[in-house]
């Protein structure tokens, strides 16, 4: 293995949670999440030789991963956003398991799956505690536009969650 491959694998291992979260936000079915995870990893590998370190690896990864997820949806026409989730493989050890928290998390992911791809990206950035400036840089829009679009995405998510609990 070359040093480039070692570096890449180390970075992917360190940041695979980002890819996992985006895959889970954009794909409902486990097989689709696995496919998207693999596609994101492949796209990152293809672009990795061009990574110059001018930004954090995680920042660069977010941009590629979100763009890949949106393109993946369009190209594959995979629109299975609503369905029965199988989260069993992600559950924590039983004695630490909080059923109420897990139910709320499942409800949130189900609601997120009903958002359009761009709103999902804003919600993802929000959940990851990105600043307005960071989101603006990632999305290529102004901070003011970020605030407007973020509020709209959060309101849509809140409406979906409220409708699902009634």
Image: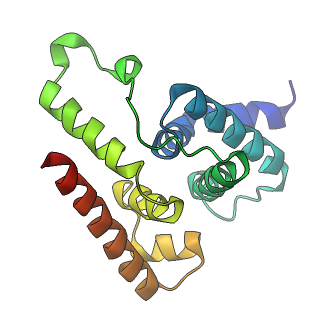
Q: Position of residue 99 (x, y in %)?
A: 16, 25
| Quadrant (top left, top right, bottom left, bottom right) of the N terminus | top right
Front in this rendered view, residue 70 or 38: 70
Q: Residue at x 40, y 52 (%)?
A: 114
Q: Position of residue 47 (x, y in %)?
A: 80, 51
Q: Position of residue 46 (x, y in %)?
A: 83, 45
Q: In the visual, does 124 lie left or right of 5? A: left
Scheme of colours in the image: rainbow
Image height of 69 relative to 136, above or below? above
Q: In the visual, does 148 lie left or right of 159? A: right
Asked which quadrant contains residue 154, the reply is bottom left
Front in this rendered view, residue 5 or 158: 158
Asked which quadrant contains residue 119, the reply is bottom left
Q: Residue at x 12, y 49 (%)?
A: 166
Q: Position of residue 128 (x, y in %)?
A: 39, 54
Q: Residue at x 63, y 63 (%)?
A: 55
């Amino acid at each position: 293995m070359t040093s480039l491959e070692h570096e890449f694998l180390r970075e992917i291992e360190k940041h695979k949670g980002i890819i996992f979260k985006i895959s889970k936000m954009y794909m409902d079915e486990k097989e689709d999440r696995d496919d998207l995870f693999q596609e994101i990893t492949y796209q990152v590998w293809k672009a990795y030789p061009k990574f110059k370190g001018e930004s954090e690896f995680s920042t660069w990864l977010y941009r590629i991963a979100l763009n890949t997820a949106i393109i993946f949806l369009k190209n594959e026409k995979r629109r299975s956003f609503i369905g029965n989730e199988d989260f069993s493989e992600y559950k924590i050890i039983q004695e630490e398991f909080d059923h109420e928290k897990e139910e709320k998390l499942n409800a949130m992911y189900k609601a997120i799956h009903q958002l359009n791809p761009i709103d999902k990206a804003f919600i993802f950035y929000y959940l990851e505690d990105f600043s307005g400036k960071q989101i603006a840089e990632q999305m290529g829009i102004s901070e003011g536009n970020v605030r407007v679009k973020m509020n709209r995405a959060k309101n849509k998510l809140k409406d979906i969650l409220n409708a699902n609990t009634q």
